Image (tube, grey):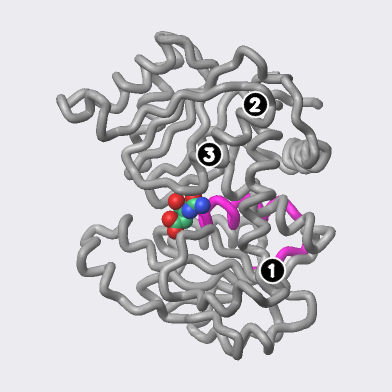
Amino acid sequence: MGRKLARLLTEKELDKELLTELFDLASTLEHTRDNRLAGKVLCSYTDEESTRTMTSTQMAMLRLGGQYIHLPSAGSSEGKDETFEDTAVTLATIGADVLALRRRDEESIFAAAARIAQLCPTPIINCGGGGMYHPTQAASDLYTIKRVRGTIDGLKIAFVGGLNNSRTVNSLAYLLTQWPGVEMYLVAPDHLQLKASLRLYLNDHRIVFRETTSLESVLAIADVFYQSRIQWNHDANPEVARLQKPPYVFNHENVSRMKEKAFILHPWPRNQELAREVDLMPQQQYIKLMHYATLMRMAILSNMLA
Ligand code: NCD
């Protein structure tokens, strides 16, 4: 293994060379149960719901012989107005070897990281920060594409649905700029379209991308469809945003019209945009993605701590 990750706050810390090493490592870990992280403890904390990211990060730790402590926000001193920064400093100081943090806003994890770097240096993994950052999910999405398709080169990927505040879409689109020949289709109504700053970044990096409101127009073109629910919880007005109907729904009928070997990824949770009948179709890879995500998180933890 070449470069060691000192922390993972944004996907910008992952270059193609390191990702390729992590893919290889993740694959070797598929049937591994060893003790390379024996004696290491991960502490996790989030003020936002998490089903997959936290459990798969904790599972990754256990699979490699490490342990974890999860501090539930409901029982923490957050209820006594303790700041997130102070909570994170505490977890680092009591002896965590690595912190897994998720936060509703984008900035807090960076502020906590800056403070921890001064007081009690400890690696931090950003397990989801606001509507912008989700580096371990993006690495897992890429690993899934590599495993299922064999290569990321020349990928035609359609991002579909609530793109504007989707941190998984943001982080994945950013990472994909490092592979040659990738083309993107940004399928969303204007108000849910990918952030302008990221579209500018794609343009500056000569990524071929097309914005469209028509899923129909790309159905027989894309190799991978990456769907995101409407990110109403990151909206300035969540209760109103929550009432929106999904602009596109994948179901048996339209999935059957994708080109051969095309497949769908979705980071879950799913709302109404992905019909349950698709779960039983060969085009779905979003369930296998959860398995590959545990392998990728094992690879990341092994890189950082072993
Ligand atoms: C996502 C997240 O929390 O950003 N899920 C995940 O971590 N696997 C996606 C979402 O909330 O829609």
Residue beneath the point at 78% across and 33% down: 32
* Residue 5 disc label: 2
The number of discs equals 3
| Label 3 element class | loop
* Residue 10 disc label: 3
- Gap in Å between the C-alphas at discs 3 and 2? 12 Å
- Pick whichever of labels 3 and 1 is earlier in the sequence: 3
- Pick whichever of labels 3 and 2 is earlier in the sequence: 2
User: Toward the viewer: 166 or 102?
Assistant: 102
Q: Which residues are magenta?
A: 167-184
- Gap in Å between the C-alphas at discs 1 and 2? 29 Å
| Label 1 element class | strand
User: Is 278 colored magenta in this rendering?
Assistant: no
* Residue 92 position in % (x across, y down): 43, 15
Residue beneath the point at 78% across and 75% down: 261
Which is in the foreground here, disc 3 or disc 1? 3
Residue beneath the point at 62% across and 22% down: 66
Badge 1: residue crowd in 10 Å (few <14, some 14–19, many ≥20): some
Disc 2 marks a residue whose amino acid type is Leu
Viewer can see residue 181: yes
Residue beneath the point at 69% across and 49% down: 292
Disc 1 marks a residue whose amino acid type is Glu
Pointer 1 and pointer 2: residues touching (CB < 8 Å)?
no
Disc 3 marks a residue whose amino acid type is Thr
- Is ligand 1 within 8 Å of the beta carbon of the residue shown at mark 1? no
The quadrant of the image that shows the C terminus is top right
* Residue 289 disc label: none
* Residue 183 disc label: 1
